Image: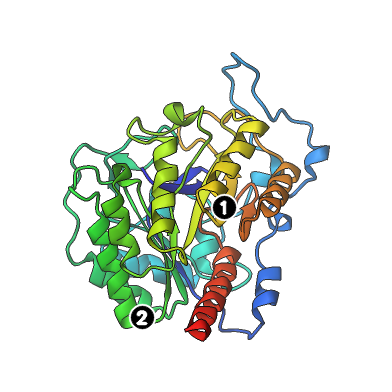
Amino acid sequence: MLRTVRSIGFKPAGFSFHTECTKCSKSFSEKLENGPSLKDFVTERSSEYGGKLKLDKGDRSRLRLPPWLKTEIPMGKNYSRIKDQLRELKLSTVCEEARCPNIGECWGGGTHGTATATIMLMGDTCTRGCRFCSVKTARIPPPPNPEEPVNTAKAITDWGLDYVVLTSVDRDDLPDGGASHIAATVIEIKKRSNILVECLVPDFRGNRDCVSTVVQAKLDVFAHNIETVERLTPFVRDRRANYQQSLRVLEAAKSENPDLITKSSIMLGLGETDEEVEQTMNDLRAAGVEAVTLGQYMQPTKRHLKVIEYVTPDKFKSWENFGNDLGFIYTASGPLVRSSYKAGEFFLTNVIKNRTKNIDQSN
Protein backbone atom coordinates (compact mmCIF):
# COMPACT_ATOMS: atom_id res chain seq x y z
CA MET A 1 0.00 0.00 0.00
CA LEU A 2 1.00 3.52 -0.69
CA ARG A 3 2.24 5.67 2.13
CA THR A 4 4.01 8.84 2.91
CA VAL A 5 6.42 9.32 5.75
CA ARG A 6 4.69 10.12 9.00
CA SER A 7 5.79 10.27 12.56
CA ILE A 8 3.49 7.41 13.54
CA GLY A 9 4.82 5.46 10.59
CA PHE A 10 4.51 6.34 6.91
CA LYS A 11 1.42 7.97 5.51
CA PRO A 12 -0.48 6.00 2.91
CA ALA A 13 -1.83 7.39 -0.29
CA GLY A 14 -4.28 10.29 -0.34
CA PHE A 15 -4.12 13.91 -1.34
CA SER A 16 -2.91 17.06 0.30
CA PHE A 17 -4.41 20.50 0.24
CA HIS A 18 -2.07 23.48 0.39
CA THR A 19 -3.21 27.06 0.39
CA GLU A 20 -0.84 29.99 0.25
CA CYS A 21 -0.91 32.40 3.13
CA THR A 22 -3.17 35.38 2.40
CA LYS A 23 -2.02 37.36 5.41
CA CYS A 24 1.22 38.47 3.79
CA SER A 25 2.85 38.75 0.39
CA LYS A 26 6.29 37.28 1.01
CA SER A 27 8.39 36.21 -1.94
CA PHE A 28 8.84 32.54 -2.74
CA SER A 29 12.37 32.50 -1.38
CA GLU A 30 11.20 34.04 1.88
CA LYS A 31 8.40 31.49 2.18
CA LEU A 32 10.84 28.66 1.59
CA GLU A 33 13.32 30.14 4.04
CA ASN A 34 10.56 30.54 6.63
CA GLY A 35 9.24 27.03 6.04
CA PRO A 36 9.74 24.14 8.47
CA SER A 37 13.20 23.55 9.82
CA LEU A 38 14.62 21.31 12.49
CA LYS A 39 14.30 24.24 14.90
CA ASP A 40 10.54 23.73 14.66
CA PHE A 41 10.89 20.27 16.11
CA VAL A 42 14.11 19.91 18.12
CA THR A 43 13.59 20.69 21.77
CA GLU A 44 16.97 19.47 22.91
CA ARG A 45 20.27 19.02 21.05
CA SER A 46 20.59 15.40 19.97
CA SER A 47 24.22 15.37 21.12
CA GLU A 48 23.03 16.16 24.65
CA TYR A 49 20.35 13.46 24.73
CA GLY A 50 21.40 10.63 27.02
CA GLY A 51 18.68 8.16 26.13
CA LYS A 52 19.05 5.03 24.02
CA LEU A 53 18.55 5.61 20.29
CA LYS A 54 19.07 2.14 18.81
CA LEU A 55 18.04 -1.39 19.78
CA ASP A 56 20.72 -4.07 19.98
CA LYS A 57 20.18 -7.33 18.16
CA GLY A 58 17.73 -9.49 20.11
CA ASP A 59 16.58 -6.59 22.30
CA ARG A 60 12.78 -6.85 22.63
CA SER A 61 12.26 -3.59 24.50
CA ARG A 62 10.87 -0.41 22.98
CA LEU A 63 12.84 2.77 22.58
CA ARG A 64 11.63 5.87 24.37
CA LEU A 65 10.59 8.78 22.17
CA PRO A 66 13.48 11.30 21.95
CA PRO A 67 12.72 14.96 22.67
CA TRP A 68 12.95 16.14 19.04
CA LEU A 69 9.93 14.00 18.15
CA LYS A 70 7.69 15.37 20.90
CA THR A 71 5.37 17.95 19.35
CA GLU A 72 2.23 19.74 20.39
CA ILE A 73 -0.89 19.30 18.26
CA PRO A 74 -2.35 22.78 17.71
CA MET A 75 -5.94 23.06 16.52
CA GLY A 76 -7.94 26.01 15.29
CA LYS A 77 -10.81 27.29 13.18
CA ASN A 78 -9.23 26.16 9.91
CA TYR A 79 -8.74 22.65 11.30
CA SER A 80 -12.42 22.43 12.23
CA ARG A 81 -13.55 23.91 8.90
CA ILE A 82 -11.54 21.42 6.82
CA LYS A 83 -12.65 18.47 8.94
CA ASP A 84 -16.33 19.41 8.63
CA GLN A 85 -16.08 19.87 4.85
CA LEU A 86 -14.30 16.56 4.37
CA ARG A 87 -16.95 14.72 6.36
CA GLU A 88 -19.69 16.40 4.35
CA LEU A 89 -18.11 15.24 1.09
CA LYS A 90 -17.44 11.75 2.49
CA LEU A 91 -13.72 12.00 1.79
CA SER A 92 -11.25 9.96 3.87
CA THR A 93 -8.10 11.58 5.23
CA VAL A 94 -4.82 9.78 5.56
CA CYS A 95 -4.02 12.27 8.31
CA GLU A 96 -6.68 10.62 10.47
CA GLU A 97 -6.33 7.03 9.27
CA ALA A 98 -2.55 7.08 9.70
CA ARG A 99 -2.82 8.83 13.08
CA CYS A 100 -0.44 11.59 12.06
CA PRO A 101 0.50 13.94 14.93
CA ASN A 102 1.02 16.80 12.46
CA ILE A 103 -2.70 16.96 11.65
CA GLY A 104 -3.45 20.01 13.77
CA GLU A 105 -0.52 22.03 12.47
CA CYS A 106 -1.10 21.07 8.82
CA TRP A 107 -4.88 21.52 8.78
CA GLY A 108 -4.70 24.58 10.97
CA GLY A 109 -2.05 26.27 8.86
CA GLY A 110 0.76 26.13 11.41
CA THR A 111 2.93 29.18 11.98
CA HIS A 112 3.34 30.03 8.30
CA GLY A 113 -0.26 29.92 7.08
CA THR A 114 -0.09 26.83 4.87
CA ALA A 115 -3.23 24.76 5.38
CA THR A 116 -2.67 21.12 4.47
CA ALA A 117 -4.93 18.09 4.47
CA THR A 118 -4.04 14.69 3.10
CA ILE A 119 -6.93 12.63 1.73
CA MET A 120 -7.08 9.09 0.46
CA LEU A 121 -8.85 8.51 -2.82
CA MET A 122 -10.90 5.32 -3.24
CA GLY A 123 -11.85 4.93 0.39
CA ASP A 124 -10.09 4.23 3.67
CA THR A 125 -9.39 0.51 3.19
CA CYS A 126 -6.32 -0.90 1.44
CA THR A 127 -5.89 -4.30 -0.21
CA ARG A 128 -2.35 -4.58 1.13
CA GLY A 129 -1.06 -5.08 4.63
CA CYS A 130 2.32 -3.41 4.99
CA ARG A 131 3.85 -3.91 8.42
CA PHE A 132 4.41 -0.23 9.10
CA CYS A 133 0.99 1.18 8.27
CA SER A 134 -2.14 1.44 10.41
CA VAL A 135 -4.65 1.91 7.57
CA LYS A 136 -7.43 -0.70 7.45
CA THR A 137 -6.99 -3.62 5.06
CA ALA A 138 -9.37 -5.99 3.25
CA ARG A 139 -9.14 -8.37 0.30
CA ILE A 140 -12.07 -6.64 -1.43
CA PRO A 141 -12.82 -3.14 -0.08
CA PRO A 142 -16.01 -1.26 -0.99
CA PRO A 143 -16.07 -0.01 -4.59
CA PRO A 144 -14.75 3.53 -5.22
CA ASN A 145 -17.29 6.31 -5.09
CA PRO A 146 -17.87 7.36 -8.73
CA GLU A 147 -18.64 10.91 -7.56
CA GLU A 148 -15.34 11.25 -5.73
CA PRO A 149 -13.32 12.81 -8.62
CA VAL A 150 -15.88 15.61 -9.00
CA ASN A 151 -16.37 16.06 -5.25
CA THR A 152 -12.63 16.26 -4.74
CA ALA A 153 -12.14 18.77 -7.55
CA LYS A 154 -14.98 20.96 -6.28
CA ALA A 155 -13.62 20.94 -2.73
CA ILE A 156 -10.07 21.95 -3.52
CA THR A 157 -11.20 24.51 -6.10
CA ASP A 158 -13.50 26.12 -3.53
CA TRP A 159 -10.61 26.27 -1.04
CA GLY A 160 -8.51 28.39 -3.43
CA LEU A 161 -5.47 26.11 -3.41
CA ASP A 162 -2.28 26.47 -5.43
CA TYR A 163 -0.91 22.93 -5.08
CA VAL A 164 -2.65 19.66 -4.26
CA VAL A 165 -1.36 16.13 -3.67
CA LEU A 166 -3.66 13.25 -4.59
CA THR A 167 -2.89 9.93 -2.96
CA SER A 168 -4.80 6.66 -2.63
CA VAL A 169 -4.97 3.32 -0.95
CA ASP A 170 -3.77 0.31 -2.99
CA ARG A 171 -6.64 -1.30 -4.88
CA ASP A 172 -5.37 -4.62 -6.23
CA ASP A 173 -9.01 -5.70 -6.52
CA LEU A 174 -9.57 -3.29 -9.41
CA PRO A 175 -8.45 -4.24 -12.95
CA ASP A 176 -6.33 -1.10 -13.31
CA GLY A 177 -5.48 -0.66 -9.64
CA GLY A 178 -7.53 2.54 -9.56
CA ALA A 179 -5.40 4.35 -12.18
CA SER A 180 -8.43 5.58 -14.14
CA HIS A 181 -10.06 6.88 -10.94
CA ILE A 182 -6.92 8.83 -10.02
CA ALA A 183 -6.61 10.15 -13.58
CA ALA A 184 -10.27 11.23 -13.59
CA THR A 185 -9.69 13.24 -10.42
CA VAL A 186 -6.68 15.00 -11.95
CA ILE A 187 -8.67 15.80 -15.08
CA GLU A 188 -11.57 17.22 -13.05
CA ILE A 189 -9.17 19.46 -11.09
CA LYS A 190 -7.45 20.70 -14.24
CA LYS A 191 -10.85 21.46 -15.82
CA ARG A 192 -11.73 23.80 -13.00
CA SER A 193 -8.44 25.46 -12.10
CA ASN A 194 -4.73 26.03 -12.65
CA ILE A 195 -3.86 24.14 -9.47
CA LEU A 196 -0.64 22.16 -9.69
CA VAL A 197 -1.30 18.47 -9.03
CA GLU A 198 0.98 15.87 -7.48
CA CYS A 199 -0.14 12.24 -7.42
CA LEU A 200 1.31 9.80 -4.89
CA VAL A 201 0.34 6.54 -6.53
CA PRO A 202 0.45 2.77 -5.87
CA ASP A 203 2.79 0.52 -7.86
CA PHE A 204 -0.10 -0.88 -9.96
CA ARG A 205 1.71 -4.26 -9.81
CA GLY A 206 4.25 -2.71 -12.18
CA ASN A 207 1.71 -2.27 -14.99
CA ARG A 208 3.09 0.41 -17.35
CA ASP A 209 -0.33 1.01 -18.92
CA CYS A 210 -1.66 2.07 -15.52
CA VAL A 211 1.30 4.40 -15.02
CA SER A 212 0.65 5.85 -18.48
CA THR A 213 -3.03 6.44 -17.64
CA VAL A 214 -2.07 8.62 -14.67
CA VAL A 215 0.71 10.49 -16.48
CA GLN A 216 -1.51 11.26 -19.48
CA ALA A 217 -3.97 13.04 -17.16
CA LYS A 218 -1.44 15.92 -17.21
CA LEU A 219 -0.42 15.88 -13.57
CA ASP A 220 2.62 17.94 -12.55
CA VAL A 221 4.45 15.64 -10.10
CA PHE A 222 4.39 11.83 -10.15
CA ALA A 223 5.25 10.33 -6.75
CA HIS A 224 5.67 6.72 -5.68
CA ASN A 225 7.37 5.71 -2.45
CA ILE A 226 10.22 3.22 -2.39
CA GLU A 227 9.59 3.20 1.42
CA THR A 228 12.75 1.37 2.58
CA VAL A 229 16.00 -0.21 1.45
CA GLU A 230 15.97 -3.31 -0.75
CA ARG A 231 17.04 -5.78 1.96
CA LEU A 232 14.21 -4.75 4.29
CA THR A 233 11.47 -4.50 1.65
CA PRO A 234 10.15 -8.09 2.08
CA PHE A 235 9.85 -7.57 5.85
CA VAL A 236 8.42 -4.05 5.78
CA ARG A 237 6.12 -3.89 2.76
CA ASP A 238 3.33 -6.19 1.60
CA ARG A 239 4.57 -9.26 -0.31
CA ARG A 240 3.06 -7.83 -3.52
CA ALA A 241 5.33 -4.80 -3.26
CA ASN A 242 8.83 -5.04 -4.68
CA TYR A 243 11.84 -2.73 -4.56
CA GLN A 244 12.78 -3.16 -8.20
CA GLN A 245 9.13 -2.94 -9.23
CA SER A 246 8.85 0.44 -7.53
CA LEU A 247 11.94 1.67 -9.38
CA ARG A 248 10.44 0.50 -12.68
CA VAL A 249 7.21 2.41 -11.96
CA LEU A 250 9.19 5.61 -11.39
CA GLU A 251 11.25 4.98 -14.53
CA ALA A 252 8.09 4.36 -16.55
CA ALA A 253 6.56 7.68 -15.48
CA LYS A 254 9.70 9.58 -16.44
CA SER A 255 9.87 7.72 -19.75
CA GLU A 256 6.25 8.60 -20.52
CA ASN A 257 6.91 12.31 -19.92
CA PRO A 258 10.56 13.41 -19.46
CA ASP A 259 9.42 16.87 -18.28
CA LEU A 260 7.41 15.37 -15.41
CA ILE A 261 8.93 15.71 -11.93
CA THR A 262 9.15 12.31 -10.23
CA LYS A 263 9.39 11.96 -6.48
CA SER A 264 9.89 9.25 -3.84
CA SER A 265 10.27 8.80 -0.10
CA ILE A 266 12.33 6.74 2.33
CA MET A 267 11.59 6.06 5.99
CA LEU A 268 14.51 5.54 8.36
CA GLY A 269 14.78 3.73 11.67
CA LEU A 270 13.91 0.17 10.59
CA GLY A 271 17.43 -1.26 10.83
CA GLU A 272 18.88 -0.04 7.54
CA THR A 273 22.60 0.73 7.22
CA ASP A 274 24.11 3.94 5.90
CA GLU A 275 25.43 2.06 2.88
CA GLU A 276 21.93 0.79 2.10
CA VAL A 277 20.41 4.27 2.33
CA GLU A 278 23.13 5.59 0.02
CA GLN A 279 22.40 2.78 -2.47
CA THR A 280 18.66 3.49 -2.35
CA MET A 281 19.19 7.17 -3.05
CA ASN A 282 21.56 6.30 -5.90
CA ASP A 283 18.98 3.87 -7.31
CA LEU A 284 16.30 6.56 -7.21
CA ARG A 285 18.52 9.04 -9.05
CA ALA A 286 19.36 6.38 -11.65
CA ALA A 287 15.61 5.90 -12.16
CA GLY A 288 15.26 9.61 -12.95
CA VAL A 289 13.74 10.63 -9.62
CA GLU A 290 14.27 14.34 -8.97
CA ALA A 291 12.75 14.90 -5.52
CA VAL A 292 13.21 12.75 -2.43
CA THR A 293 12.09 12.95 1.20
CA LEU A 294 13.49 11.09 4.20
CA GLY A 295 11.69 10.87 7.54
CA GLN A 296 11.59 8.90 10.78
CA TYR A 297 9.49 5.72 10.96
CA MET A 298 7.41 5.51 14.11
CA GLN A 299 5.40 2.52 15.28
CA PRO A 300 1.64 3.19 14.91
CA THR A 301 0.47 0.33 17.20
CA LYS A 302 2.00 -2.59 19.09
CA ARG A 303 1.00 -4.86 16.20
CA HIS A 304 3.31 -3.06 13.80
CA LEU A 305 7.07 -3.10 13.31
CA LYS A 306 9.07 -1.68 16.18
CA VAL A 307 11.37 1.28 15.75
CA ILE A 308 14.91 -0.06 15.63
CA GLU A 309 16.56 3.34 15.71
CA TYR A 310 15.64 6.97 16.25
CA VAL A 311 17.77 8.84 13.73
CA THR A 312 19.16 12.14 15.04
CA PRO A 313 18.44 15.51 13.42
CA ASP A 314 22.15 15.85 12.62
CA LYS A 315 22.08 12.55 10.74
CA PHE A 316 19.01 13.61 8.79
CA LYS A 317 20.86 16.80 7.83
CA SER A 318 23.73 14.72 6.47
CA TRP A 319 21.28 12.77 4.28
CA GLU A 320 19.92 16.07 2.97
CA ASN A 321 23.43 17.11 2.00
CA PHE A 322 24.05 13.72 0.37
CA GLY A 323 20.86 14.05 -1.67
CA ASN A 324 21.81 17.52 -2.84
CA ASP A 325 25.25 16.25 -3.86
CA LEU A 326 23.61 13.42 -5.85
CA GLY A 327 21.72 15.99 -7.90
CA PHE A 328 18.17 15.81 -6.55
CA ILE A 329 16.47 19.14 -7.22
CA TYR A 330 14.75 18.84 -3.85
CA THR A 331 15.81 16.80 -0.81
CA ALA A 332 13.78 17.08 2.39
CA SER A 333 15.25 15.15 5.31
CA GLY A 334 14.24 15.43 8.95
CA PRO A 335 12.61 13.53 11.83
CA LEU A 336 9.11 14.81 11.02
CA VAL A 337 9.46 15.27 7.27
CA ARG A 338 6.67 13.73 5.20
CA SER A 339 6.33 12.85 1.52
CA SER A 340 4.21 15.98 1.19
CA TYR A 341 5.00 18.47 3.88
CA LYS A 342 4.84 22.25 3.91
CA ALA A 343 7.66 24.10 2.11
CA GLY A 344 8.35 21.33 -0.40
CA GLU A 345 5.26 22.18 -2.39
CA PHE A 346 6.28 25.83 -2.63
CA PHE A 347 9.69 24.77 -3.92
CA LEU A 348 8.29 22.35 -6.51
CA THR A 349 5.72 24.92 -7.59
CA ASN A 350 8.55 27.29 -8.47
CA VAL A 351 10.42 24.57 -10.37
CA ILE A 352 7.30 23.57 -12.35
CA LYS A 353 6.46 27.16 -13.29
CA ASN A 354 10.01 27.83 -14.45
CA ARG A 355 10.03 24.65 -16.54
CA THR A 356 6.70 25.52 -18.11
CA LYS A 357 7.98 28.99 -18.93
CA ASN A 358 11.13 27.61 -20.55
CA ILE A 359 9.13 25.07 -22.61
CA ASP A 360 6.78 27.82 -23.84
CA GLN A 361 9.72 30.04 -24.81
CA SER A 362 11.44 27.21 -26.72
CA ASN A 363 8.24 26.57 -28.70
Is 23 placed above or below 330 here?
below
Is the residue marked by circle 2 packed among few (<14), some (14-19), or many (20+) residues within 10 Å? few
Q: Nearer the viewer, residue 213 or 93?
A: 213
Q: Which quadrant is the N terminus positioned in? A: top left
Q: Secondary structure at mark 2?
A: helix
Q: Is residue 240 left or right of residue 283?
A: left
Residue 3 visible in the displayed image: yes
Q: Quadrant of residue 191?
A: bottom left
Report the label total.
2
Is 354 placed above or below 107 here?
below
Task: State the image coordinates of residue 148 (x, y, percent, origin top left).
Answer: 23, 65
Task: State the image coordinates of residue 221 (x, y, percent, origin top left).
Answer: 45, 64
Q: Is residue 101 left or right of residue 178?
A: right
Residue bearing the label numbered 1:
292
Q: Residue at x 58, y 64 (%)?
A: 344
Task: State the image coordinates of residue 145 (x, y, percent, origin top left).
Answer: 19, 60
Q: Secondary structure at mark 1?
A: strand
Q: Residue at x 63, y 28 (%)?
A: 63
Is 230 placed above or below 102 here?
above
Query: At label 1, which amino acid type do we have?
Result: Val
Task: State the image coordinates of residue 317 (x, y, percent, origin top left).
Answer: 72, 49
Query: At label 2, which amino acid type do we have?
Result: Asp
Q: Nearer the viewer, mark 2 or mark 1?
A: 1
Residue bearing the label numbered 2:
158
Is 328 placed above or below 356 here?
above
